[in-house]
Amino acid sequence: AGSKLKEVFDKINNLLSGKPVQTEGQTVSVTQHPQGLEFVYYKLAEKFVRHGEGEVSFHRDSAFPIAVVLSGIWELHPRVGDIFLAHLHKKCPYSVPFYPARKEGTSMEEYQRMLGYEVHDSKVEEQDHFLKRMSGMIRLYAAIIQLRWPYGSKQGAHPHGLSYGWRWLAQMLNLEPLADVTAMLLLDFLEVCGNALMKQYGIQFWKTMFFIQKSYIPRIEAVTSSGQMGCLSRLKNFVQKCLQAEEIPLPKGILTPSFWRT
């Protein structure tokens, strides 16, 4: 509910503003320790990224309520946004976007960590689980860049708005595609913020969609084996439908004005 989300936002904002906050039966304040505020900035940013790889990867619609709170906090406390991006880029290099190359002397285990895989006791997580986590983080990022906290002053620009999404898309299409990963990330990104990018960039956006269909999808196909076609097929269908309809649908779970009255 909108009212519940506002409570969460106010509590986080109060904590970061140095006010005492009640939690788990005790009162805490960042003023209790010289590094208290820095510590809270760090842990809060880390927690938002964890929500992306956990909550959003399983409940896709949850990207929007989480993103709108972070967007508002970012506006009032820019340090949280900076640290959030640092955590996000480390956990999901594709959010830069960047595909790390394996350097000489780097062990396979270390390289897999650089690619975003979780490695425990030399065992690498399953590909499905890895893709799910990356998907959740990209969907959260794509939600953040288009949302603003409705109760803010909105005097300045969004601290990390749609221009960053446009840049991400352009940079992504300049990279050589990877099997599995590229098709999934493009589909997630376009499903979540394609509608907002369409409204903002108009004809330039449609030129990009046409480029994806004619030039980039064949390049993804060239590196994709027959067993990895699922996500690529969904991306192809999505792009084709949008070009035919000349419309990108609103993302599922977007927060409508009526949500804030709940």
Image (cartoon, rainbow, N blue to C red):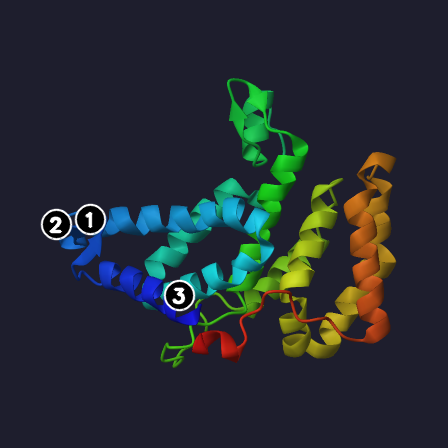
* Numbered disc 1: secondary structure: helix
Quarter of the image for residue 117 reads top right
Left/right of residue 191 with respect to residue 49 in the rendered view:
right
Which numbered disc, 3 or 1, marks the residue closer to the eye?
3
Q: Residue, x 26% and y 46% (percent of image)? A: 39
* Numbered disc 2: secondary structure: helix
Q: Residue, x 63% and y 34% (percent of image)? A: 101
Asked if residue 98 shows in the view, the reply is: no
* Numbered disc 3: secondary structure: helix
Kind of residue indicated by mark 2? Gln
Rendered-image quadrant of the N terminus: bottom left
Quarter of the image for residue 165 reads bottom right
Other residues around mark 1 within 10 Å, as few (<14) / some (14–19) / many (≥20)? some
Other residues around mark 2 within 10 Å, as few (<14) / some (14–19) / many (≥20)? few
- Label 1 near label 3: C-beta < 8 Å? no
Asked if residue 90 shows in the view, the reply is: yes
Residue at label 2? 32
The numbered disc on residue 5 is 3
Kind of residue indicated by mark 3? Leu
Q: Residue, x 44% and y 74% (percent of image)? A: 262
Residue 262's place in the image compared with 131, above or below, is below
Residue 162: horizontal and vertical position, in percent? Answer: 56, 69
Residue 60's place in the image compared with 224, above or below, is below
